[in-house]
Amino acid sequence: MEGSLGRRSASSPYGSYRRPPSRGRYSTGTGRRSHRSASTPPRQKTPCCTRSRARCALIVLLIFVALGLAGVLVWNFTYQPLVVDFGGLVHYDGASQSFILRNLSTSEVLRGTLGADLGPEPYTCSTGDACFQWPDRASLVLRHRVMEEEGVHCTNVTWQALSAEEDGWRPVDCFMVDSAHWYGGPEMYQQRWPINNGSGVMQPYVTNDFRLRDFPPDTPVENFTAYGNVADRFFFSSKGVAIVVDDVTPLHVSINQSGDGKLCFMANYTSEYPNPGGRRPVLQYTVCSGRNALDIHEHMYSRFYGRLNAVPDTRMLESPVWSTLARYGPNISETTVGEFAFQIFDYNLTGSNMLIDDSWEGRYGDLTFNRTAFEFPDPSNLIGYLHQKGLEVSLWVTPFINTDSAAFRESVEKGYLVRTDPNNPNLDTPVPALVRWWRGVAGLLDVTNPDARRWYLSRLHFLRENLTVDSFNFDAGEARYFPDIPYYTHEPLVNPNVYSSKWVEMVSSLGVQTAVRTAYNTQSFAVYLRMMEKRSSWGGDNGLRTVIPTMLLFGVLGYPYVLPAPIGGSEFPDKELYIRWMELVAFFPSMHFSISPWQFDYDTVEIAQKFVAIHEDEVTPLVLQISRSPVIGPTADRYAPIVRPLWWHYPNDIMAQTIDDEFLIGGVMLVAPVMEQGARARTVYFPGGGEWRDERDGATYAGGETRNIPVALDEVAYFTRV
């Protein structure tokens, strides 16, 4: 069929066609089909033709190889999910988001998932040691460093959200923590040691107040799921893994939420993390692996946290501190405080400092005594009397300036408060961002404003110079107390926790007797960190059972000088609870009384006398020795807490890694207080090798063994290293 490019017709003049064995289907030349008669001899092959066909075949082969290589390159560098393996130490799969961390001995020490809900497989990018990008979703940059001489390697992880804020994708990284014991993190209502023995729901990681007071005033509302007043971004494990999250991250954290065995970090701008510039969330942290918990703690602490710039006043270490809070609440006066001081010495007890707590001010924020006839008609006389008794005087102070105070009007006019407008030039005075706290409605001092700081401190100096007040007990300062509406500070805050840092920095200038109750990256300031009030209960809901875990937490975070919660809790406890609590606190750096022993009976007073003497004669010399050693202070070559977990000196002792009701003072004294109601004996684990001597009867026990030890109501089992 003419003109057809299809199959030949049966009537074709060429008949049936058969391809010559030595030629291709089509001939060269005119392009017409050729045929040869049966009588025509076959054309002989020539070497030239053979060489031409070989060249063609080689060229075709090379083209196919090049296309294949190009395809492989395109697949690997554009479409294939990137798998990173830094020397067998860090493994990350961009498709599954699975993450594995090994130590320098190549043992697996951490497993997790970096990123979630990212959609299509990532592209690679050229930033860092490894870089991934999920189009319109996120980028991930990994940087890796090995420090062989320290036995440590570290990976910096940086997530950047790329989608618009309203699209809702947020970086979330989760690590499995059920195969190790984890320490550090936030102060918690249900404090546990290790922290993965407890649980914390995903929430903004800001300094908070889990003993909120709502209206009406002074009505306690306990938020037992909230993180607390101390919220450093430092977590580490018994397997020698540590994670420090950067300030730039609007951080949310969950810890073993609903028993899921995970520690999760999320970056998200919420009301707790204002974002007026519309920034997209960044999750940035450093994860390191070392030999054990002690080594990795030392490495991370020296890298990320400052050394203590001085030692706080030792008087608060040597003799008990007394405060009016738990005993009197806001119902204090010149008479009650004076009688309280008289009773301390009348019952043959000692004291270093009297903390005059809530309600000494006439109006909150004015920083002046309520000089009415029934309150403090002559504060100079009271302070003189307390000094005569040998007690220094500390006043309770907050950054809140109530709206009914004279200081509020002055601070508004001068722009000293956190405000609602970003320096609006059309306003004569900035509009303060009012906050609600447990004593009313107030403005919040803007501690980022140098003029506001000078103004506030000058008023405290006036109290010191004119009334001879010795020091101050600073309450609040947590980021939780920022207003719910958009607010602005003189200097923009990287994250709201920086307010807590600047608050502590400011008040630390008032001397080494200063006490604060919040902390965030403030390890270098010579102040006492006050433990949040505890409930008068035996249990783990902010009761006695949480006191040792909280003290251990503060110590490993870098806060060795702790003013514990008042003995017996913030309510009136039963006698046995009070005695066991008092016996425990006698072995802390400071003792803190508010409920007084004579409110029970004289037997309780005698036990108090005994344990105050033990604190002053046996514990204080050891604490002062540690304070002068090369592990604390501005000349320290490393850091160690005063009150230490059992694993601090025995980091590979598996039993020591989970003990939450014993502790070490330095490396020489082991303390095992009774923590159970009605108990007259307790199980004691003796860490390490060597022997421990019972300081009550001289009996010795071998390290590594567990023994049941009798402990009477007026005793604590404590041992020294032989």
Image (cartoon, grey):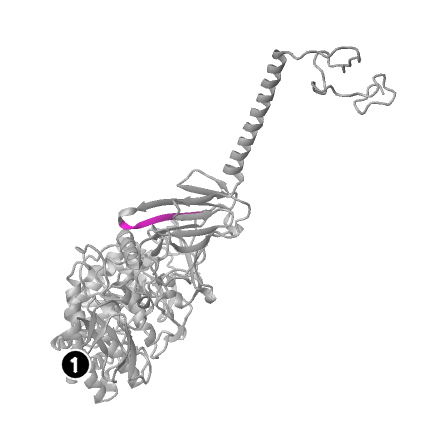
Q: Quadrant of the C terminus?
A: bottom left
Above or below 637: residue 481: below
Asked if residue 156 is among those painted magenta in the image, a careful observer would answer: yes
The magenta-colored residue range is 150-159
Task: Decide which of 41, 441 is in the foreground and name it.
Answer: 41
Image coordinates of residue 206 in percent, x first then y, are: 38, 60
Q: Is residue 87 visible?
A: yes
As helix, strand or loop, the secondary structure at mark 1 comes to: loop
Asked if residue 12 is among those painted magenta in the image, a careful observer would answer: no
Task: Decide which of 198, 56 is in the foreground and name it.
Answer: 56
Task: Decide which of 668, 611 is in the foreground and name it.
Answer: 668
Q: Quadrant of residue 358?
A: bottom left
Q: Quadrant of residue 238?
A: bottom left
Above or below 179: residue 100: above
Image coordinates of residue 347 in percent, x first then y, are: 17, 85
Q: Quadrant of the N terminus?
A: top right
Task: Farthest residue to the right: give it.
Answer: 11
Specify whether 507 is left or right of 618: right
| Magenta part, dominant SS | strand
Which residue type carries mark 1? Answer: Leu
- The residue tagged 1 is 349
Residue at image coords 59%, 23% = 60
Q: Is residue 468 visible?
A: no
